[in-house]
Amino acid sequence: MTTKLAPGLLVAAPSLRCPFFNHTVVLLVEHDDDGALGFVVNRPTERKVDSLLASLDVEDRAEELGGEVWLGGPCAPDTGWVLFDPSSGDTRDVEAVELAPRIAVSASRAFLERLARGRGPECYAVLLGYAGWGPGQLDDEIREGSWIWIDADPSLVFDRAHPERWAAALATLGIDPARVVGTRAAEA
């Protein structure tokens, strides 16, 4: 493999019609000869973090947590991850991997318990599942034009509203999906 794509953002090309990945933005966490792994960052669910914590028997909640649960991808939907901005609160001694400035991820149950006690970062989302590609699969999809790579941008991940992330990511490259032939701007 000649390029290092992670960390970065994969933006679904306007022509990508896969039902799950249509109009998605994926935070690519790993990319090497063994494959790739990332998290969809613009597919919120209706579920709130409080509900998820209760289903996991995480007790001792200090306050109501209004955080969102996102659908991180179609693979292993029973796995959980916390994507967060480590600069947005106390994240000392947290088991996590910092991917880029203002973007980190944790799979630690202890981290969820810390969130429940109100001692975590202010800016976070809990993800269920992930997006995964086998060896060479993502590279082939990029060559075919299904995905567009851009730098990991924390403002796209955390600061933009979900419905705006896909079009905003394309706009960083000067692409207006409404002007691309064959796309339906109303779906953006």
Image: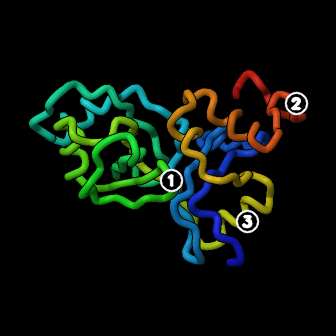
What separation in Å lies between label 2 and label 3 (alpha carbons)? Answer: 26 Å
Relative to 114, 125 lies left or right: right
Kind of residue sitting beneath label 2: Arg
Q: Mark 2 or mark 3: which comes first in sequence?
A: 3
Is the C terminus in the top left, top right, bottom left or bottom right quadrant?
A: top right
Q: Which residue is mark 3?
A: 140
Kind of residue sitting beneath label 1: Pro
Q: Which residue is mark 2?
A: 179
Residue at (66% x, 63% y) in the render: 138
Residue at (47% x, 50% y) in the render: 103
In the displayed structure, 1 sits above or below 53; it is below
Residue at (14% x, 33% y) in the render: 61
In the displayed structure, 106 sits above or below 173; it is below
Q: Nearer the viewer, mark 1 or mark 2?
A: 1
Is the N terminus in the top left, top right, bottom left or bottom right quadrant?
A: bottom right
Contact flag, marks 1 and 2 (Cβ < 8 Å):
no
The circle on residue 80 is: none
Kind of residue sitting beneath label 3: Asp
**In the orientation shown, which residue stands out farthest toward the left?**
60
**Residue 183, how many percent across, how many down?**
81, 32
**Residue 94, how many percent across, how many down?**
27, 56
Q: Mark 1 or mark 3: which comes first in sequence?
A: 1
Residue 74 shows in the view: no
**Residue 33, how many percent across, how many down?**
59, 77
Q: Which residue is mark 1?
A: 101
Of helix, strand and loop, which one carries label 2? helix
Of helix, strand and loop, which one carries label 3? helix
Q: How many marks?
A: 3
Residue 68 shows in the view: yes
The image quarter in which residue 174 lies: top right
Of helix, strand and loop, which one carries label 1? loop
